Image (cartoon, rainbow, N blue to C red):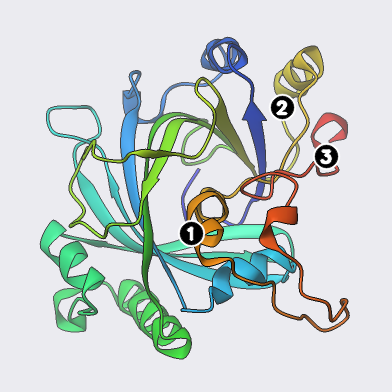
Amino acid sequence: MEAHQKRKEYKFVLASGVAELIRTEVARNLPPDRDARDGYPIISEYYDSEARCSYWQKQFGSQNRRRVRTRVYGRANAPIPPSAFVEVKHKLNGQASKRRVPVDMEAIVNFSTGRLPGKESIPEVMDRRVLSEIEGLLREQNGRPVVQIRYHRYAFDSGPEGTIRITFDIDPRCRFKMAPLAPDDPEFELPLLEEGRAIMEVKTIGPVPYWFRQLLGKHRLIPRGFSKYAAALELYEFESRKLERPVSSGRSSESTSLASSPEPGGAEKTKSPLQHS
């Protein structure tokens, strides 16, 4: 499955001990992404406004929202070598897509300080358009780096012409010190989940395969919305800042403490069409 394709996304927060069982069963039906059987590290830097507009758009259920991040994949001497991207993740009416521009590590570091890659250094016309979109978003929101997040990903993919991709993100951690992004940097001290838990994400175009629906039923798995970015803010930043919830049209005008959120990252249960597709 290609990153730019529009797809449905479902997330599952797996209990300790369950993640390994599910991953083993998925591996029997889908090949590992680019033959990376041991997975690969991902390090991301998320951008937002001072008022955390991107976060609140998600919390208020905006049907058209975009989030800017930079991302470094892989590690040296591994099936997935180091690579870096500037990305915008777009959620529109329940469907998600990702537009990104490949850049070198120097450009990623410069981006954190507000220096975008020069368009003359980007050969592809479509990539230049994406870069212009990202520049506009950051200018509109006065966006800046907010938090960096690292986790280890095991990915299984049905291929470029396939319709499903399943990933398992292990040991997600964050930091609010904006260090230069570097491949496989281990210095992330703040956990986003209890030890042993994992995030499974399912990206699908069209019906979910029967074998996976059976797997969900066997383990009684229910999709639960979870955002690593939101979890980082709720667990660490908002607790110290005591931020109040802004007013959204059509909602109560009373401010609500962030502490009332049911679970960090917005891990509420969601209605699932997966078992009935």
Side of 111 where 145 appears, left or right: right
| Residue 129 versus residue 239 in the image, above or below | below
Q: Are marks 1 and 2 in contact (CB under 8 Å)?
A: no
> Which mark is first along the chain, 3 or 2?
2
- Residue 121 in the image, given as x and y percentages of width and height: 14, 76
The amino acid type of the residue labelled 2 equals Pro
Q: Which residue is rendered at x = 76% and y = 24% of the image?
A: 221
Residue nearest the viewer, comparing 167 with 58: 58
The amino acid type of the residue labelled 3 equals Ser
Which residue does the numbered mark 2 point to in the structure image? Answer: 209
> Which mark is first along the chain, 2 or 1?
2
Q: Which residue is rendered at x = 70% and y = 22% of the image?
A: 212
* CA–CA distance in space, label 3 to label 1: 31 Å
Q: Nearer the viewer, mark 2 or mark 3?
A: 3
Local crowd size for mark 1, using a 10 Å CA cut-off: few (<14), some (14–19), many (≥20)? some
Q: Secondary structure at mark 1?
A: helix
Q: Are marks 2 and 3 in contact (CB under 8 Å)?
A: no
| Residue 109 versus residue 28 in the image, above or below | below
Which residue does the numbered mark 1 point to in the structure image? Answer: 237
* CA–CA distance in space, label 2 to label 3: 14 Å
Q: Look at the image and tell me whether residue 123 can be seen.
A: no
Side of 254 where 267 appears, left or right: left
Which residue does the numbered mark 3 point to in the structure image? Answer: 272
Side of 34 where 161 appears, left or right: right
- Residue 243 in the image, given as x and y percentages of width and height: 60, 70
Q: Which residue is rendered at x = 58% and y = 66% of the image?
A: 242
| Residue 47 versus residue 174 in the image, above or below | below
Q: Look at the image and tell me whether residue 202 can be seen.
A: yes
Q: Are marks 3 and 1 in contact (CB under 8 Å)?
A: no
